[in-house]
Amino acid sequence: MSIDIVGIAKNFGRFAALDDIHLRVADGELLALLGPSGSGKTTLLRIIAGLEWPDGGELRMHGSNALGVRASERGVGFVFQHYALFRHMTVSDNVAFGLQVRPRATRPGKADIAARVRELLRLVQLEALVDRYPDQLSGGQRQRVALARALAVEPRVLLLDEPFGALDAKVRKELRRWLRRLHDELGMTTIFVTHDQEEALELADRVVVMSQGRIEQVGRPHELYDQPATPFVQRFLGSVNALPGRVEAGRIIAEGIELPRIAVPGETEATVFVRPQEIDVVPDADAPGHIRFIWLVGPVARLEVELQSPAGIIEIELPREVASAGRLAVGQRVRLTARQARVFGGQGGGAGRDPVPAPAA
Amino acid sequence: MIYQPDFSDIVLNIDLLARGAWLTLALWGLALGFGLAAGLVLGVVRSAGNRWLSLPAAAYVEVFRNTPVLVQLVWFYFAFPVLTGWQMSGFAAAALGLSLNTSAYCAEIFRGGIGSIARGQWEAGRALGMGYPALMRRIVLPQAVRRMVPAFTNRGIELGKMTAIASVISVHELMYEARQLSATTFRPLEVFTVIAVLYFVVIYPGTWLSYRLEARLARRG
């Protein structure tokens, strides 16, 4: 089912949770709403679900107005952040519940409900736990029961609010890959909320980056990462060094780091964004920077280099073997060269001009 | 001179105490039954968020919680007939007073229990298409009641002991019969020792059952 969001706005008192949101979700798409706390992503999800009402705008599902329709009649399955399983019911009762409370006219028979529950528990790999109570399950198992319960009512849209937020890193990784496979199998329009950029980039077909109730950018994961539209998106999708730069003869220069050729017309100064993994480090006794710290984190070496320039401290990420081969050490003077950099219009103030990925000089 | 306890008069009049104990049980059962039922209605009404319903319910609760139960019983026995012209027996006045008092306390227990259920539970029910009454019946109350059992146990114990106040308006329950027996036999120590035991025997089984229920509910998650 396709979803059209047209000019949706929502205020809580004087706080604008959503401000003129326009978005189209294609049928069968897996979409991520990504943003920090308070960006409005959960509010938007709840409006789609019918658990919250907007102050303005339109919501169309499959072409028809959904705002006049009760939550239960929208054909939506909702998975809550903390699962919201019914603690007094067993796993099978939780999954069956949505079917049992239907009006008599549309309620399946007991045998049909039991068969559907068995099928769903097989789908989420929990057949063995039918008689357990939620308190007797692990976080990952609860998450899958919540998903089965949402799927039981045969929704046309599946909505998930921070589905992996309460799980540890290993379980998170396993579950999100499993969810991707499940989505591909079911082909259902799915929207999930997350503040974890890795999760959004790995799982979604498209990602909507939100900040302060507005959409900053919508695109495929690689588009967002390679061509961020605003400084916010650049900063939010992984760590980044923001360097003060000045423009000379239409080219940008940042003290202490060699930049590729980037054309910046009509500016005198601008902020240059360089990702930690886009910087090469070469030992050089005459260079203006020295290594302050080196952290070895699994296969990666993280460096902190202090420049004697307004740029201050630069974060760098190298493959561990590169750092070892270069015999880098704390206190050593190094020369920095950025392989790629980005500049946004209006001194990085988020004017949203398409960034100019720099070709190597 | 050492006091010599003598229970022979009590044994001879045990039928009086048994009748009193039976009346105490009847009073307790009536007040608890009505109090729970009315308390449930009041608690749900107070939780519903409709001001036209919740404000009168709140006023009712506060009146009965903030006036002494003794005053309430005396009022129903002496003042109520004057105002309405409807004469009540001591037992009816006691049953009514204790029931209304209990319903006010139970309403607050229900309200607290309902309020303790996480918002996500309500929303999960709504997302599955449930209205307020069904949500209450199928999702909220079954979970809330588990949390309320200890509070209801305390209330029940208090009420069991509170029935003794009915003796003030000449209800022939256990305390009334004990006072009568004490006055005629001049054996207060023996009489009140026996009725203390009788109160325990009457009240404790309910307490024990509630502990069992609590443990069973805890096992079920």
Image (tube, coloured by chain):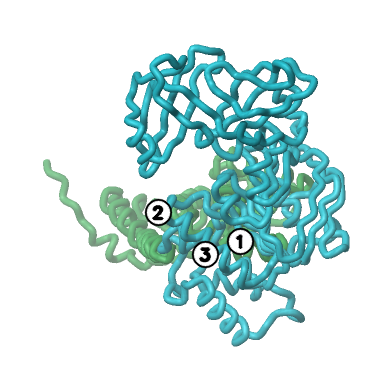
Chain colours: A cyan, B green
From the viewer's perspective, tell me whether residue A44 is left or right of residue B203. right
Residue B198: x %, y % from top left: 34, 59
Position of B165 relative to A261 (above/below)? below
Residue lying farthest front?
Answer: A361
Task: Sort mark 3 into few (<14), some (14-19) or many (20+) by Cα contacts within 10 Å.
Answer: some
Q: Which amino acid type is marked by label 3? A: Trp
- SS class of the residue under badge 2? helix
**Residue drawn at the location 61% of the way across and 61% of the way down:** B37
- Protein chain holding label 2: B
- SS class of the residue under badge 1? helix
The residue that label 1 is drawn on is B37
- SS class of the residue under badge 3? helix
**Residue drawn at the location 45% of the way across and 57% of the way down:** A139
- Taking the image as drawn, is residue B89 in sight? no
Front of the two marks 2 and 3: 3
The residue that label 3 is drawn on is A178
Which corner quadrant of the image does residue A150 belong to? Answer: bottom right
Q: Which mark is residue B180?
A: 2
Front of the two marks 3 and 1: 3
Question: Which image quadrant: the C terminus of chain A?
Answer: top right
**Residue drawn at the location 60% of the way across and 40% of the way down:** A237
